[in-house]
């Protein structure tokens, strides 16, 4: 993991990240079109070319917000793209035996 952290501080990674930022216009490529969330992270969709990304490989990188990044790495159960339930749906779920906390 040490090599990976060093790589994330390298000029090469900075160039890749900047390329992705320009491509997505600074918006999250996963939820930004709905939420307006800003790109905060550059996410690898796979690690096949890790440390050796070239311009053609930038398609495998996603510019995403913090919330989407946490969700994709299973650090959060909150999916910014999940539909927000209405009060009626929450009450119905609670009535049907679902536990709802406010």
Image (cartoon, grey):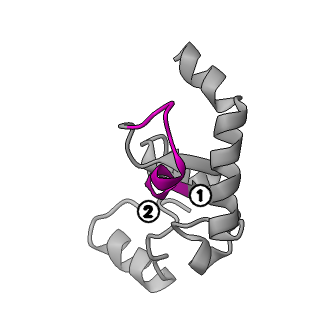
Whole-percent x and y of residue 42? Answer: 59, 49
Whole-percent x and y of residue 53? Answer: 50, 41
> Is 5 inside the magenta-drawn segment?
no
Which residue is at the front of the view, 96 or 56?
56
The count of marks equals: 2
Which residue is at the front of the view, 41 or 34?
41
Q: Is residue 42 above or below residue 52?
A: below
Residue 75 is left or right of residue 28, and the answer is left
Q: What residue is disc 2 on? A: 100
Cα–Cα span, label 2 and label 1:
33 Å
Secondary element at tag 1: strand
Whole-percent x and y of residue 23? Answer: 63, 67
Residue 40 in sight from this viewpoint: no
Determine the residue positioned at 32% across, 63% down.
98
Determine the residue positioned at 61% across, 65% down.
28
Q: What residue is disc 1 on? A: 63
Q: Quadrant of residue 63?
A: bottom right
Q: Is residue 55 above or below residue 98?
A: above
Mark closer to the observer (2, 1): 1
Q: Quadrant of residue 19?
A: bottom right
The answer to whether the residues at label 2 and label 1 have Cβ atoms under 8 Å apart is no
Determine the residue positioned at 44% across, 42% down.
73
Give the mark nearest the N terminus, 2 or 1.
1
Residue at the extreme top: 2
Question: Which quarter of the image is occupied by the C terminus?
Answer: bottom right
Q: Which residues are magenta?
A: 49-62
> Is 59 inside the magenta-drawn segment?
yes
Mark 1 Cα-neighbour bin, 10 Å: few <14, some 14–19, many ≥20: many
Q: Quadrant of residue 91?
A: bottom left
Which residue is at the front of the view, 15 or 38?
15
Q: Is residue 50 above or below residue 4?
A: below
Mark 2 Cα-neighbour bin, 10 Å: few <14, some 14–19, many ≥20: few
């Amino acid at each position: 993991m040490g090599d990976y952290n060093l790589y994330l501080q390298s000029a090469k990674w900075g160039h890749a990240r900047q390329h992705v930022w320009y491509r997505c216009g600074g918006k999250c490529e996963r939820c930004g079109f709905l939420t307006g969330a800003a790109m905060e992270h550059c996410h690898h969709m796979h690690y096949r070319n890790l440390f050796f990304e070239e311009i053609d490989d930038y398609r495998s990188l996603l510019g995403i917000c913090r919330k989407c990044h946490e969700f994709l790495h299973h650090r959060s159960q909150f999916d910014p793209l999940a539909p927000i339930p209405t009060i009626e749906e929450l009450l119905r779920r609670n009535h049907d035996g679902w536990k709802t906390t406010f």
